[in-house]
Image (cartoon, rainbow, N blue to C red):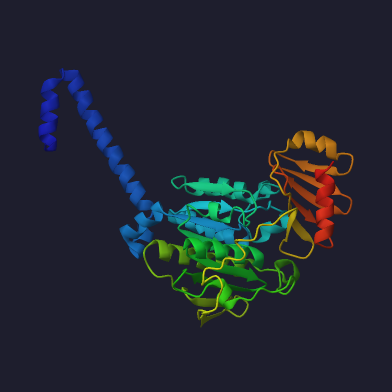
Amino acid sequence: MPFYSQFRYRWNFYPPVQQMHCFCAYLMNAHILKLFLAYYTMRYSRQEIVIGKDGQKKLSQATVAVLGLGAVGSVAAELLARSGTNLLLIDRDVVEESNLQRQLYDEDDVDKPKAIALKERLASVNSRIRIGAVADDFNASNAEALLTSAHFVVDGLDNLYSRFLLNDACMKRRIPFTYSASVGTSGIVSTIAPGKTACLRCFLPNPSPGALETCETAGILAPASATVGALAAGEAMQHLAGNIPSLAGELLSIDVKRASFDTATLPQRHDCPACNGAYTFLEEKEHGMRTAQLCGTKSYYVAAPKKLSLDLHAFAKQLGKICRVQRQNAYVLQLACGSKDVTLFRNGKMIVRNASNENEAKSAAARILSS
């Protein structure tokens, strides 16, 4: 029914005063709806020129898991949030003051789990998207479950063991993902499409601990990690919008000091175990206390055999005999235990700093949990 016919029908039906109220309300509602639609379209209007309305719709329906929320992961996550893509944020670490030089956190975020802090930040950036946060370890027992809802995964990890595990999980579930890392002034990015391109184990050996440089040993420049994060986000957006990512099957190496960008093609290995269905990292079922060395040589992530549920307030009083409680909030305890600094989570997992080796970290963790 045309607008004039609608108005004439309502005008004859209501008394004169209500006729005017009805007319004004009709115009007001129509105006508000028009403004809302204009605002919604305006938010992504510049982006839609590049990827199209259909591409934007695909982004809004997809979920990207960002695994590791450090210098690369936090930048990629923010760009994806601004693009209108739903997110799943996964990281076991907490924000430290040394992170603020390159990672997208504020001073008020120090000692908060990174997943929680970044979720809070990105919720204020884009309230229209869905953001999940998991402040937990990524391991063989939960890898597949964590990635169930993901359409793409951005690698922001800081160790090769976790990357091989990610590779196995994504290869098995056929989820495309980036291999993205940065150290010093350089960085690398590649997109791995299971069954179509080389996977991580096709071109990357399994080095011994300490074989590769880390951000603690070689340092890291923020523009390098930010560039890698931006490229990883761009690869995710290309795939989700229905295009072939530019770095699918290619390895891009960058160096911001030399302002260089070099690309190499990655061939598939016919004898690659993961490409042939042998997911050895995913099938590992570790027993006892598990450890993983973090970015650097003196920090270890330690997980007890069973997930716990600690009353941190009560536990802090017990630990007063062997450790000094430095800080405490609803998520973690910051402890000074002799020469070691320890971050204890509610689930009993912890980060032990200043440990000379894995066994020393395990010993410190066992002493705290048995107190």
Q: For the point 47% across and 45% down, which residue is it?
A: 127
Q: Which quadrant of the rendered structure holds the N terminus? A: top left
Residue 146 point in image, percent of width and height: 55, 52
Residue sitting at the far top: 15
Residue 338 point in image, percent of width and height: 89, 51
Residue 109 point in image, percent of width and height: 66, 48
Residue 267 point in image, percent of width and height: 50, 81
In the image: residue 314, left or right of residue 139: right
Count of number-bearing discs: 0
Please tell me whether residue 360 is drawn above or below residue 132 in the rendered image: below
Nearer to us in this view, 302 or 94: 302
Would you identify the image quadrant in which residue 272 lies?
bottom right
Q: Which quadrant of the rendered structure holds the C terminus? A: top right
Residue 314 visible here: yes
Please tell me whether residue 122 is drawn above or below residue 357 in the rendered image: above
Residue 354 visible here: no
Would you identify the image quadrant in which residue 160 lies?
bottom right
Q: For the point 37% across and 68% down, which residue is it?
A: 243
In the image: residue 102, left or right of residue 82: right
Nearer to us in this view, 239 or 203: 203
Please tell me whether residue 322 is drawn above or below residue 17 in the rendered image: below
Q: For the point 33% across and 43% down, which residue is it?
A: 36
Q: For the point 86% across and 44% down, which residue is it?
A: 323
